[in-house]
Image (tube, rainbow, N blue to C red):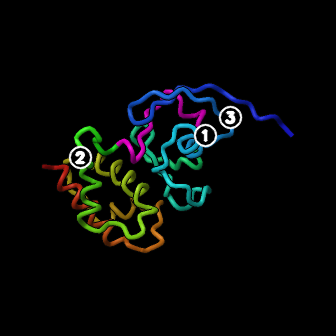
Amino acid sequence: MEAIMSKNLKLNVNGKGYDVEVGTNETLLRVLHEKIGLTGAKIGCESGECGACTVLIDGEPRLSCLTLAVDCEGKKIETIEGLADFESSKLHPIQEAFIENFGFQCGYCTPGFIMVAKAFLDKTRGREFTDEEICEAIAGNLCRCADYISITQSIRAAAEKMRK
């Protein structure tokens, strides 16, 4: 059996620097939870099937359960915890839209959907898009409560909020 090596990393998560020692086989999801204390990205399937662990890495949605932490050094990582402005107690417009449009039921999948929505809305800012494009953007995320209509409505409402 091969020994697992460890490495000291400097990670940029939600605009803050973290020095962490990680095993070279540790996923970003586990490092976020166990070493940084950010639990917004949910532990779901841990095989890349559900999307509950989605974070943004350099603005792109990534499944943190399949991403090695050692591959994230020097990259900008954004989690659901980084969206709200805690100093002013203001939620991000996407978070507000999900609340206002009931874009969740149990809420377990919601952080992943919100992070995918953020990446999608950042890319489509200023242009019209179709419900098919929304469905394509969220295709890697599963809602076990099957609330996809409310999720799609929430993303549309968030786009409108972000235009203002």
The residue type indicated by label 2 comes to Lys
Q: Earlier in the sequence, mark 3 or mark 1?
A: 3
On whether residue 73 falls in the magenta region, the answer is yes
Can you tell which quarter of the image residue 152 is in?
bottom left
Q: Earlier in the sequence, mark 3 or mark 2?
A: 3
Q: Secondary structure at mark 1?
A: loop
Return the residue at label 1: 68
- Drawn side of residue 105 relative to residue 156, left or right: right
Residue for point 40% across, 60% down: 110
Q: Earlier in the sequence, mark 2 or mark 1?
A: 1
Residue for point 48% across, 44% down: 38
Q: Secondary structure at mark 3?
A: loop
Read off the magenta span: 68-82
User: Which is more toward the observer, 162 or 87?
Assistant: 87
User: Which is more toward the observer, 161 or 84?
Assistant: 84
Return the residue at label 2: 90
Return the residue at label 3: 24
Q: Quadrant of the N terminus?
A: top right
